Amino acid sequence: MQQFNNKILVTGGAGYIGSHTVVSLIEQGFEVVVLDNFSNSSAEALRRVERITGVTLDVVSADVRDRQALQNAFEHNKFDAVIHFAGLKAVGESAQQPLRYYLNNVDGALQLLQVMNDNGCKRIVFSSSATVYGDPSSVPITESFPLSATNPYGQSKLMVENILRDISSSDPNWQISILRYFNPVAAHQSGLIGEDSGGVPNNLLPYISQVGVGKLEFLSVYGNDYDTHDGTGVRDYIHVVDLASAHIKALKVLDDEHGCQSYNIGTGRGYSVLEIVKAFERASGQNIEYKIMPRRLGDIASCYADTDKSARTLGWQAEHDLDDMMRDHWHWQRKNPNGYN
Ligand code: NAD
Ligand code: UFG
């Protein structure tokens, strides 16, 4: 019989990063309960997680703001920790629907933290984003860089980070890891789970891969006049499976660390848009048509992580390189041209 060490509540566990993390958790012997309202995900993702792991999942279909549903989950389970992925994440949409974003992301975190507190569970790993560094004055970015936000999505992440720092200072029993993800890409090697962007994607890799399968005609490259080596935007792309393993390391470190710590989760390497196009063409054998367009509002030139702290403290570093990321992204896209539908 499988031995479980700890039971983890994973909010947003049906989503892109959540589903990959659930696989890693199960592979590492954790017992998992997923709570998701499926507002941006499909139950099919969880069925596929079950196929990969051979484990039947315990799923609570509820909104993280539903305090009674959360309380019931805590009454039925003794959670060792929570990984909080549940949230809305589209930057552009957040500017059009700020209230929806604050209600979902900030109120969601508040309800969760209150129920955790009421039930004496004070260990949490929170999904933050490199967006909290705003437009950094230099790269690579360390965790001690000043924090700011340029859109409601980024504000919501920063607000939750501040709430976490406040509760940690008020009560030393809290054990909190804030993971600031850089640009998650790719998919599980099985090609069974991956990012289902639904509709026309906003992010670079999902967009390129839809050009690759012929669903979109060409990529718009947003600006080639940035202060970068080829003029296009530079980002730190990180394989979602590496991202998932960072959560396992964070949980393990929390076993004996109190307080609130933030960690950059990236590879520490930046690639330009044009380098990504070339790498994708190499991995897929497809020709990616692109056109240079004006800059996209709110974009910054360069963003990549200093990963020293996560390497030293979490004992974590990314293992997949750019070619692995492109291969696995393409594999998922080719096998699932319509996502989970
Ligand atoms: P996703 O949309 O695929 O997953 C989020 C999941 O949360 C979905 O399954 C959705 O249905 C669920 N959810 C949303 N609101 C909910 C609510 N109120 N109650 C219950 N469930 C709810 O997104 P993802 O890419 O897996 O991102 C996970 C987390 O990581 C998010 O908090 C996101 O802001 C953060 N993040 C993502 C990126 C990225 O580029 N993907 C970068 C940095 C940070
Ligand atoms: N880009 C294009 N064409 C596209 C899409 C993107 O040229 O069709 C460019 C962008 O201008 C940028 C780069 O590709 O230079 C990456 O863009 P993404 O939209 O993939 O990612 P961002 O870095 O803009 O944003 C991501 C997440 C945000 C998060 C941010 C910081 O989507 O949620 O990283 O972590 F806030």
Image (spheres, helix red, strand yellow):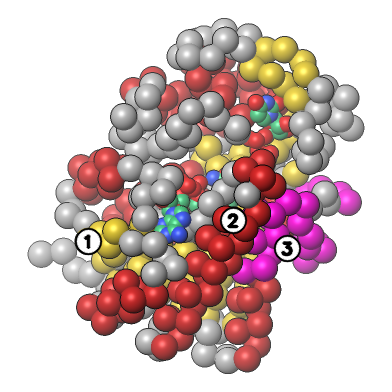
Q: Secondary structure at mark 2?
A: helix
Say above or below: 43 vs 73. Answer: above
Dot 3 falls on a residue whose secondary structure is loop
Q: CA distance from mark 2 to mark 3?
A: 25 Å
- Disc 2: CA contacts within 10 A as few (<14), some (14-19) or many (>=20): many
Asked if the residue under mark 3 is in contact with the one under mark 2, i.e. CB atoms within 8 Å, the reply is no
The tag on residue 101 is 2
User: Is 161 a magenta residue?
Assistant: no
Dot 1 surroundings within 10 Å: few (below 14), some, or many (20 or more)?
few
Q: State left or right for residue 50 relative to residue 80.
A: left
Magenta stretch, residue numbers? 137-160
Disc 2 to disc 1, C-alpha distance: 27 Å
As rendered, which of 333 and 163 lies closer to the eye? 163
Query: Residue drawn at (78%, 52%), measured in percent from left and top?
Result: 150
N-terminal of the two: label 2 or label 3?
Answer: 2
Give the x, y percent position of residue 93.
62, 43
Mark carried by residue 143: 3
Left or right for 82, reference 47 = right
Along the viewing direction, whichever of 198 and 164 lies nearer the viewer: 198
Is residue 140 covered in magenta?
yes
Type of residue at label 1? Asp
Foreground tag (2 vs 1): 2
Q: Could you classify mark 3 by the number of other residues whose Cα lies within 10 Å: few (under 14), some (14-19), or many (20 or more)?
A: some
Q: Locate the N terminus by quadrant.
A: bottom left
The amino acid type of the residue labelled 2 equals Tyr
Q: Quadrant of residue 267?
A: top right
Q: Residue at x 50, y 20 (%)?
A: 210
Q: CA separation, marks 3 and 1? A: 35 Å
Q: Which residue is mark 1?
A: 58
Residue type at mark 3? Glu
Is residue 30 visible in the rendered image? The answer is: yes
The extreme left residue here reads 1
